[in-house]
Image: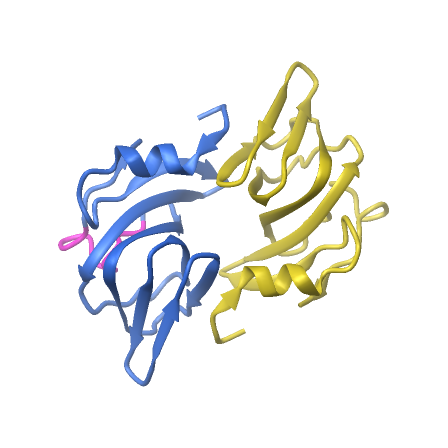
Chain colours: A blue, B yellow
Amino acid sequence: MDDKVDLAEKFALLDEPYKPGIVGYMNDYKLIVVKVQGEFVWHKHDDTDDFFLVLKGILDIELRDRTVTLSPGEMFIVPRGVEHRPVAREETHLLLIEPTGTPNTGDAKTAAARKLV
Amino acid sequence: MDDKVDLAEKFALLDEPYKPGIVGYMNDYKLIVVKVQGEFVWHKHDDTDDFFLVLKGILDIELRDRTVTLSPGEMFIVPRGVEHRPVAREETHLLLIEPTGTPNTGDAKTAAARKLV
């Protein structure tokens, strides 16, 4: 964790969609890489904004009133409390920033496990 | 600030090295784009880790005991309190994450002004 991180190398270590890997820590936040494909669940985070940066592929972030479509090099921050559903038409690579301890569905019971990669 | 951000578009709006632009807010943090070229000053941040992601170019992050060289798609987090000096051999594009209010030199008196882009 005290050296540089090559994000492409980290993505190569991820074997399943929606199984995130932690690639670093900054203060009380974790930097996460995740491959997504298909639909995630509708959810919201009441205590944190939700940061997405697309590095490969295309991500639709469905909101209740519109859809935000992100291509590589595009980012979007879903404000806290806003329901959203990420949907990827193809294998898509994301960099996420989350407060330490945030479950990815906004609910610890349904959240995907994290691993350090 | 409620729509997606195309980072390449934001970089195109930056006209000078080391003049950062804020492209979004996440909780108490700001997302910043900056073009760098040449040497920055030696500095440290006593209260925050310092996140760098290179999107274009090459960045040497000189530490007192070694140099970390970042290419596009590589990130590094300088731990709080650690002296460092960013040096870019060519025009280099960075995405940074900083707590709201952090001066880029660790010292408000010498810090570069921020603008929303």
Image coordinates for residue A38, horizontal then vertical, percent? 18, 61
Q: Quadrant of the C terminus of chain A?
A: top left
Q: Main secondary structure of the magenta part?
A: loop
Q: Quadrant of the N terminus of chain A?
A: top left
- Quarter of the figure with residue B69: top right
Image coordinates for residue A45, horizontal then vertical, percent? 31, 64
Q: Nearer the viewer, residue B106 or A63?
A: A63
Q: Which residues are magenta?
A: A102-111
At 44% from the left and 33% from the top, the residue drawn is A6
Left or right of A77, for residue B9: right
Residue furthest to the top: B65
- Quarter of the figure with residue B92: top right
At 70% from the left and 26% from the top, the residue drawn is B83
Residue furthest to the right: B109
Residue furthest to the left: A109
Image coordinates for residue A25, horizontal then vertical, percent? 44, 37
Relative to A69, say whether B110 is above or below. Answer: above
